[in-house]
Amino acid sequence: MEKIYHDKLILRGSPLTGENPQPLFRGPDLAVAEGLGFPADKRYSFGRETGFRILPYTMQDRYDRELRDMEFPSVVMENAFLRAEFIPALGGRLWSLYDKQRKRNILYRNPVFRPANLAIRDAWFSGGIEWNIGRLGHSVFTCSPVFAGIVKAQDPVLRIWEFERQTRLFWRVEFTLPENSPLLYAYTRIENPDTFGKPLYWWTNTAVPQTPGVRVFSAADEVIYIVPDTGAVKTMAGGRLPDLPVLPGKDASYPALSDYSNEYFFQNDRACGSLREPDSRKLPWESAVYEDGYAFGEISTAPLLYRKMFCWGSGRGGRRWQDFLTLPEIKPLTPAGPLLGETYLEVQAGLAPTQLHTADIAAGETLDWVQAFAALNMDPEEAHQKDYGAARAYVEDKLMRQIKPSALEAALEAARSRSAMEAEITSMGSGWGALEKAVPPGLCFPAVSISEAEAPWAELLRGGALPPRPPSAGPGSFAVDPAWEKLLEASPKTEGDWLSPYHLGVMAFEQGDTLKAAACWETSLKQQENPWALRNLARAALAGTDGKTGMEKALEYYRRALKLEAPPSPAGSAEQANGWDTSFLEEYVPLLIKAGKEEEAAVILAPYTVPGILETLPLPLVDAAAVLALNRGDDALLDRIFSLEPAHIREGNTTLVDLWQKRENRRSSKEEPPREIDFRMYTPC
C-alpha cells in the first residue's frame, strides 16, 4: 500500500538570515550570437527575456559558509519500490529519490544545505529535482517556501503550488506514486490568468550522480551547445552527438570527458513533433546510464519537449564549484550506494529549445504535462557501445518498455480530472496569491498566508493607501506591475508619506521611466528625509547620460544616505553602528573606486579588513578591498583575501582570480591561483 506522510530532514547547513532590502532594477537582455551550425528554425525568441530581473522580489544574499544544525519539515511518498522526500520550505525541492529494490539513491542527494550565489535571487543549493518557472535562471522560489498539501483523490496526491509574480502565472506540480509502481509521476500545470499572452520559461532540473563512465542520451542526437569563452556574448552553435567541435576527439555523451563546465540541449522536436503539434507516438525522454548498467530515466508528455545536459567539468574551477556546494567528507544520513560522490551532473527538461529561448503562453491559456521518473537496469555493453546511434536506440527501447507512453497519457487525464479539487494545506507559501482575484480552480491561497511582506499591499487593496512606515523600518516588499501602480497613484496624498512616492518611483524606474522615477523619489524626500530614496536617486543618476556629472551626483546621494560627515565604524559584519544596512556600502565603496576616489574608499574599508570581520564581508566589499590592496601593494592583505572562501561568488565572476593574476604577472610567477578563489568555468589552454 502506498504511503504519504510527514517527516523531517536533519542536515548541517548555512541558513538564510535575511534579504537585501534594496530594489535591484532590471538590466537589458543578454547579447547572444549564432555559432557554427545553429539551426535556422531556432531563431525565434533566441535571447528574449534573458536580462537580469529581480523585482518585485528581493535578493536572498544574507548567509555565510558556517554550517549549523538545521531541521527541514518534509513530505515523504513511499511504496515498495521508491521513497521520495520533498522539502516545501525549499521551493518544493525533491531532495531525494531512493530505489528501495536496488538500495541506491537515484538522484544526487546533497549531504548538506549549502547556499551559493547561483539563482535569480542569489541563494541556490545543489541536488535533487528543482522546479524552475519564470525566467532564465534558477527559480525565485528555490530557497523560499511554497504551498504544499494533500489532494484526497483515488490515490493520494502531493501538490505544491505558488503564484509567480514577475510573469503573473499560477503553477502547480502534483506527485503520485501508485501502489506497486516503480514510477514517480509529476503533473505540472501552468495557468495564465491575464488577457494577454506572455513568454514562458520552465525547466525541471534533475541532479544525478556523475561517475567517470556515466553516459547521457535523449530522443534526438541533434543538440544546440554553448560555445565556451565568448565573453559577454552568449554564443550557441549546433551539432550532433557524440562529436562536438568544442570537445575534439572525445565522445560528448560522456560528461566526465568535458574539461570545462559544459551544457548542451537536445532538440527533441526533431523526433517528437513540434510544441503545438506533438507526435503522440513518440514522447520526449532523457536517460543517464552508468558503467554497471544502472540508469536514471525520465519521460514526459508534450509540450515538455526539450532536454539538457549540464556538467561542471573536470577543470579546476568546475571541481571547485562541486566542492563549494557540498562537503564530500560528510556522509549522507541514509544509505547512498556506490554512486553517491562529490560530483553530479544535471539532466533537465524544458519547454523551449535552450534556456536562452522562451516558449509562449496565450491569454487565459493553461499548459500542462506529466513527467515520470524511474530507475532501471540496462545491458552496459549495449548502452556503452561505441556506435552512439545504436546505443541511443537501445536505451530508448528499454526506457519505453519500463515507462509506457499509455501510462503517461492516463496519468495526464487523471490529473486534469482532479485539477479543480483543493488540497488540504500542510505547508504555507507566500501570501501574494491571496491578493489576486482570478485564482484558478483547485488552488487555495488562504488569508492566513498574508504575512508582514504582503500586509501593506493588502491594506492598499482594502483601504486605498499603504499604511505609514518609518524609514528606519526600510521600504518593505515591492510590487511593480501596472495594476498595483494604478492603485497606488489613486491613493490619497498624506502629509509625511514618504513611502507611496518611493514605491511609485520604483515602479517607474523598473519600467524604464527614469525622469518620472526621480521625480517620485524627490517627492519622497520632501515628505521625509530617508536613505532609501537617496540611494535610488543615485541609481537614477548613474543611469543618465551625463557621465562624470552623474557619477558625482550619485556619490553625493550615497553620502547623504549614509550621513557620511565622518567615516563609519563597524559593528559586526551585517550592519553599521548607526543602523545602516550593509547594502548601501556594498554599492557605494565600489563606486568610489570606479570614480578614482581610492583614498575615500580606503578610509571607509579600513575597519572592515581586520580579522574576524573581513571573513564575513559581502563579496562587493571583498572585491573592493582586494582592488585597493593590489593598487597599494599590500600583499599581506591580499594574501588574507585570497585565502578566504568568498561566500557569495557568482557563477562567471572572476574578479579575485583576475586580481591574483595581475599580481603574479608583476612577479613573473607561473603558479596556479589559490584553490579558494578559482571558480573559472572555462580555463583556456
Image: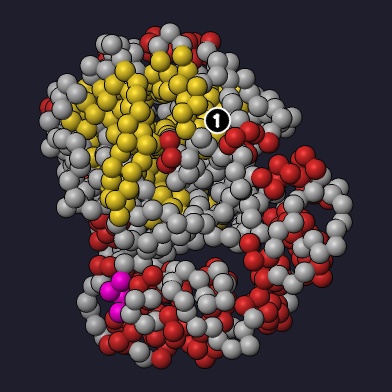
Which residue is at a point 48% across and 87% down the rendered structure image? Answer: 602
Q: Left or right of 332: which side holds 17?
A: right
| Quadrant occupied by the N terminus | top left
Q: Left or right of 642: which side holds 104?
A: left
Q: Please give the residue where the numbered disc 1 appears in the rendered image.
A: 171
x and y, in percent, of residue 358 in the image: 56, 38
State which region is magenta: 640-644
Q: Left or right of 53: which side holds 557?
A: right
x and y, in percent, of residue 615 in the image: 35, 72
Which residue is at a point 46% across and 14% down the rendered structure image? Answer: 152
Question: Relative to the observer, which residue lies in front, 194 or 401?
Answer: 194
- Up-down relation of residue 202 to residue 474 (above or below): above
Q: Left or right of 426: which side holds 82?
A: left
Q: Amino acid at mark 1?
A: Trp
Q: Is residue 64 visible?
A: yes
Which residue is at a point 61% across and 48% down the rendered structure image? Answer: 453
Task: Please say whether residue 42 is one of the residues in the magenta stretch.
Answer: no
